[in-house]
Amino acid sequence: MTERRRLPSDKLERADLDGAIAIVGMACRLPGAPDTAAFWDLLASGRDAIAEIPADRWDNAAFYDPDPQAVDRMSTRWGGFVDAVGDFDAAAMERLLTEKFESWPAKTSPVANLPDASPQQGKRLLLVDKPDSTNTYFQIGNIGIARNNPDRVYINVINTLFGGRFTSMLNDGLRVSSGLTYGARSSFDQRKSRGSFYISTFTSNENTEKTVDLALEILKRLHEKGITEADLKSAKTYIKGQFPPQIETNDQLARLITQLEYFGLDERDINDYYAKIDAMTLADAQRVIKQYFPLENLVFVFIGKSAEIASIAKKYAQKIDTKSISQPGF
């Protein structure tokens, strides 16, 4: 039995609607309810959506055992099951999609041609003052690459070694070896136009200078010493091992296909991926480091307690902009 309750009118009139939320869309597929209307009926009627295991799911008799301790067996015959899961008839799906969408008028969407942002020349620093902060959060970087950059595979290999995994140069130096932070990383934000490259981490206020200095030292070491053949082999193996789980599910594949279409790429981005990784040499690595990992031209962003770190910030750039965390945009 269910009881539908309503908010008394006197309380409704006094209700504070300043933080009201409008639900403009809703969808679901649940046991016993293929959509939201059916789910509401299920709740309103008080029906139980738990049923015996359907024969088309698995042979219940082959796996059932009343003993909960029985190995490789289950001690229940019941469960909640969503209808129409698993494979489907592709031809029937295509007919259904055609029926629903074929009559939609075709429209040409304007192409957004975004110019690349201009890279920073020299050094510049933005200090965002958060007076109550006990930590300094900072990023160091510049303009990076677009998603269709022809060197993107090689860049990923180098970035994996520099700041893209737990055993990277940055994380090892700033976390594992020195304990200055809980984690440090570097990343290339790849978009249609050139995104950003950045080093990112945080540390206590008193360790701000030491942590920034060490991050810059590791970046300089990457340029001066490069990587070894063993490093290159390790990164290649790591990336090739991490890639397959990223394209296992239908959802992952749909996302990938959408991205390829959006960025003007094709199946070669996937089919040739391993071959490009394998073809990378130490000479390629050194070229990529010099070309894509900025050393002298850098933008710094510090978020922290200005009273304690402003004097430190002056060490890294002549041009410093200061904002308050309470200003619009922060």
Image (cartoon, grey):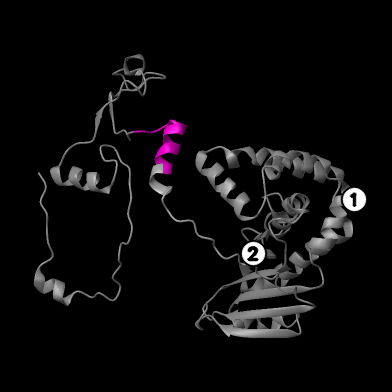
Please say if 329 is above or below 72. Answer: below
Magenta region: 84-98
**Which percent across, then down, holds residue 163?**
71, 56
**Which percent across, then down, holds residue 144?**
72, 64
Q: Secondary structure at mark 1?
A: helix
Please say if 138 is above or below 156. Answer: below
**Which percent across, then down, holds residue 15?**
19, 74
Query: Residue beneath label 1, please?
Result: 283
Q: Secondary structure at mark 2?
A: strand
Indicate yes or no whether the magenta region holds residue 92. yes
Q: Name the residue at 81% across, 68% down.
A: 295
Badge 1: residue crowd in 10 Å (few <14, some 14–19, many ≥20): few
Instruction: State the separation of the CA atoms marked 1 and 2.
Output: 30 Å
- Majority secondary structure of the magenta segment? helix
Residue closer to the observer: 43 or 263: 263
Indicate yes or no whether the magenta region holds residue 53. no
What kind of residue is marked 1?
Answer: Ala
Label drawn at residue 208: none
Query: Is residue 316 among the parts visible in the rendering?
Result: no
Indicate left or right for 285 with 131 as reference. Answer: right
**Which percent across, then down, holds residue 187?**
68, 59
Q: Name the residue at 49% across, 56% down.
A: 106
Q: Quadrant of the N terminus?
A: top left
**Lower position in the chain sequence, tag 1 or tag 2:** 2
What kind of residue is marked 2?
Answer: Thr
Task: Name which quarter of the figure residue 16 lies in.
Answer: bottom left
Please say if 109 is above or below 69. Answer: below
| Whether label 1 touches label 2, CB < 8 Å | no
Query: Residue beneath label 2, please?
Result: 201
